[in-house]
Image (tube, helix red, strand yellow):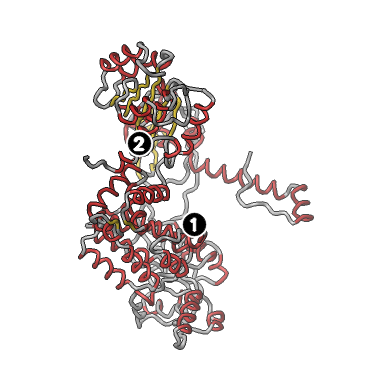
């Protein structure tokens, strides 16, 4: 007799022997016992989970007559009557299994439906089992809808598919749907244990667990792999044989990787990676197994009872759970998962795997620079060293920056002083001292830097190529944000003469210790600036207009870039030209972008329509001050100040602040 594979030899013959689908078995058993039979069933699930097996058991339940021939519909088919034996052997004439992948057209479906009207030959029901039903064409689905909804009383339909998303909803609504789950590894291991025991084949339980992992939830795949392992190991299923057959990674590599990571040994990590490269092991599989191992370690840290005791690496998992914190394991798991996704983007698999390991090492909490980073370069001799004692730092005033300070860096320095790259915080210094004490050596306190003694504000470069002016501020001025005019770029007047601000020329007596370096260089010229232009009206009698350009620009019926041109421009002069009677509007425009797409012509047309006369528009690029946009901003700011003042002077609010200590949240007041 020819050999029969395990998947066919040990196919379940009843609901009691079916493994891993208890929810489906329970529903079908209750329906059969109560005679509540549906006319169409749909089984969905991945390959090898029991769809065809369930359909055969259900067909036997429909047509079983018992050993004495007097039985009826039952949830426990006898397996010895003519119907049960014929269905198990695949030769029952009233149980038709059709493959929809090769019979997917409307003609095949029409032929099947024509035969469905005839009564069964020697059975209670005629059962049609259509496998991979999602392969049918739309016309085939449409042709079977009516029969599937109201079939003859002697016809039962059983549909099976691995992709229910491709089945029309009109078919799904006519069927009783059961979703079959993937087989858990524990169920597969126990089933393989039972089968190999009946076959009198020696095996190792870790090898069965590895086979269950390689099956990925499919019982048929697990049995096929078991057949292959029996042939590979010459009748004995061992762990070494299964690892060699599947090309699985030896868990000892992963244990060594985590041990090196626990010891912060970068050399050991790369040594394991190089050894894996010499054996041509898959780095993708290594990261996958590393994620599984980290998952077991996380379980051992939180729920130790969830780790199977028969796991080959159980002792190593429990040991590693004590070497790492829970946060570290979660971080390593995330890095391993992302590293596996990035292998295709890496220059090669070795580089991607090595970078994943180094990322775990670099981002491990508590991994300091003393273990893997070179010592920082000494500070240049030209810069004075900061005074170590805290008393000296408090007595000496904070050094003023040798450049113009912007408002944002000044405010940030006041709230939270930032340290430059390489500066050692007090917490880091204490950690280094504690590490030195644990190693038995004398704790060597690192030399404090200027960033640890006093906050340093970053100097903002001036647009001019010349060196920025040195402005010394008193401590009171340093605590307040810089005035808005201190951030304006210098500009010259119309005749080329520069105007200087009295604020920019104001200086205080320099501190000797703070400006020791700045005093060595000659002080540049003070920053010059121009006084603001006063707002002027340009009335024109012929236009019957008071000359208020911001008010006019705000009401002109224009949109888009032309509207922005009107709102963000300043009227320099307006009046008739000597050579003609045209009214000329001379506008100062901030940027030339506002003149794009014919915006000047559109604004000219709107002005002509507004005044009823022909006007001409002349534009000049330059700095603007008195515009409709600036007037709107000033109006909003004034209304905001009035609203805040009204809120502060409100008697009820003052009573709340006085009696209950209430405060007004800054920025929460809005004008109506």
Disc ID at residue 306: 1
| Vertical order, 23 against 42 (above or below) | below
At a point 44% along the width and 25% down the height, the residue shown is 68
Left or right, residue 389 beside residue 383: right
Q: Nearer the viewer, residue 460 or 205?
A: 205
| Vertical order, 437 against 607 (above or below) | below
Q: Identify the element where label 2 is drawn.
A: strand
Chain-order first, disc 1 or disc 2: 1
| Vertical order, 193 against 123 (above or below) | below
Q: Position of residue 30 (x, y in %)?
A: 52, 30
In the rendered view of the protein, which quadrant contains the N terminus? Answer: top left
Q: Which residue is mark 2?
A: 618
| Vertical order, 40 against 647 (above or below) | above
Q: Position of residue 437 (x, y in %)?
A: 48, 84
Q: Position of residue 491 (x, y in %)?
A: 39, 56
C-alpha separation, residue under disc 1 versus residue under disc 2:
82 Å
Disc ID at residue 331: none
Furthest toward the front, the residue is: 68
Q: Nearer the viewer, residue 390 or 537?
A: 390
- How packed mark 1 is, by other alpha carbons closer than 10 Å (few <14, some 14-19, many 20 or more), is few
Q: Indicate the quadrant where residue 661 lies.
A: bottom right
All told, the count of numbered labels is 2
Left or right, residue 11 beside residue 507: left
Residue 512 in view here: no
């Amino acid at each position: 007799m020819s050999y029969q594979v395990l998947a066919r030899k040990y196919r379940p013959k009843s609901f009691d022997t079916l493994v891993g689908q208890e929810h489906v078995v329970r529903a079908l058993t209750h329906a059969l016992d109560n005679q509540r039979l549906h006319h169409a069933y749909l089984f969905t699930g991945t390959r090898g989970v029991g769809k065809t097996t369930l359909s055969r058991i259900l067909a036997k339940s429909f047509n079983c007559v018992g050993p004495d021939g007097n039985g009826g519909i039952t949830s426990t088919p006898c397996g010895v009557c003519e119907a049960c034996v014929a269905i198990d052997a695949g030769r029952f004439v009233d149980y038709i299994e059709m493959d929809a992948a090769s019979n997917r057209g409307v003609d095949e479906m029409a032929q099947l439906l024509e035969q469905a009207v005839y009564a069964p030959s020697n059975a209670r029901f005629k059962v049609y089992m259509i496998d991979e039903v999602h392969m049918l064409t739309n016309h085939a689905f449409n042709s079977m809808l009516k029969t599937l909804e109201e079939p003859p009383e002697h016809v039962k339909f059983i549909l099976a598919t691995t992709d229910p998303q491709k089945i029309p909803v009109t078919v799904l609504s006519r069927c009783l749907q059961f979703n079959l789950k993937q087989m858990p590894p524990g169920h597969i291991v126990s089933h393989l244990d039972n089968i190999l025991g009946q076959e009198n084949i020696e095996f190792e339980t870790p090898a069965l667990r590895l086979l269950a992992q390689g099956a990925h939830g499919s019982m048929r795949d697990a049995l096929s792999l078991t057949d292959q392992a029996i042939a590979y190991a010459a009748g004995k299923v061992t762990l070494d044989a299964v690892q060699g057959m599947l090309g699985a990674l030896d868990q000892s590599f992963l244990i060594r990787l985590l041990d090196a990571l626990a010891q912060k040994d970068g050399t050991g990590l790369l040594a394991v990676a190089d050894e894996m490269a010499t054996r041509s092991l898959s780095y993708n599989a290594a990261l996958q197994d590393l994620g599984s191992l980290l998952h077991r370690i996380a379980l051992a840290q939180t729920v130790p009872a969830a780790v199977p005791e028969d796991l080959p690496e159980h002792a190593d998992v429990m040991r590693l759970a004590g070497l790492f914190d829970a946060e570290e394991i979660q971080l390593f798991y995330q890095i391993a998962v992302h590293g596996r996704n990035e292998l295709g983007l890496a220059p090669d698999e070795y580089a991607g795997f090595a970078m994943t390991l180094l990322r775990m090492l670099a981002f491990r909490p508590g991994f300091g620079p003393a273990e893997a980073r070179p010592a920082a370069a000494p500070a240049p001799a030209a810069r004075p060293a900061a005074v170590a004692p805290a008393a000296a730092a408090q007595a000496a005033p904070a050094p003023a920056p040798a450049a113009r300070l912007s408002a944002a860096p000044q405010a940030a320095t006041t709230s939270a002083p930032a340290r430059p790259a390489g500066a050692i915080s007090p917490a880091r210094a204490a950690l280094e001292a504690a590490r030195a004490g644990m190693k038995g050596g004398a704790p060597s306190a690192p030399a404090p830097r200027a960033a640890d003694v006093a906050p340093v504000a970053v100097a903002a470069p001036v647009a001019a190529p010349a060196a920025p002016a040195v402005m010394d501020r008193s401590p009171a001025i340093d605590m307040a944000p810089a005035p808005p005019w201190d951030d304006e770029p210098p500009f010259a007047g119309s005749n080329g003469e520069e105007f200087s601000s009295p604020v920019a020329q104001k200086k205080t007596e320099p501190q000797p210790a703070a400006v020791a370096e700045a005093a060595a260089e000659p002080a540049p010229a003070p920053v010059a600036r121009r006084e603001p232009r006063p707002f002027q009206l340009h009335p024109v009698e012929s236009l019957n207009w008071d000359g208020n350009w911001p008010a006019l620009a705000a009401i002109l019926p224009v949109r888009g870039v032309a509207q922005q041109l009107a709102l963000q421009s300043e009227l320099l002069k307006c009046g008739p030209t000597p050579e003609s009677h045209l009214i000329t509007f001379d506008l100062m425009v901030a940027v030339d972008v506002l003149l794009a797409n014919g915006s000047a012509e559109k604004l000219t047309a709107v002005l002509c329509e507004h005044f009823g006369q022909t006007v001409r528009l002349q534009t000049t690029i330059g700095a603007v001050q008195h515009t409709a946009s600036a007037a709107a901003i000033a109006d909003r700011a004034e209304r905001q100040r009035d609203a805040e003042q009204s809120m502060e002077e409100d008697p009820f609010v003052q009573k709340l602040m006085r009696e209950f200590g209430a405060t007004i949240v800054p920025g929460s007041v809005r004008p109506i």
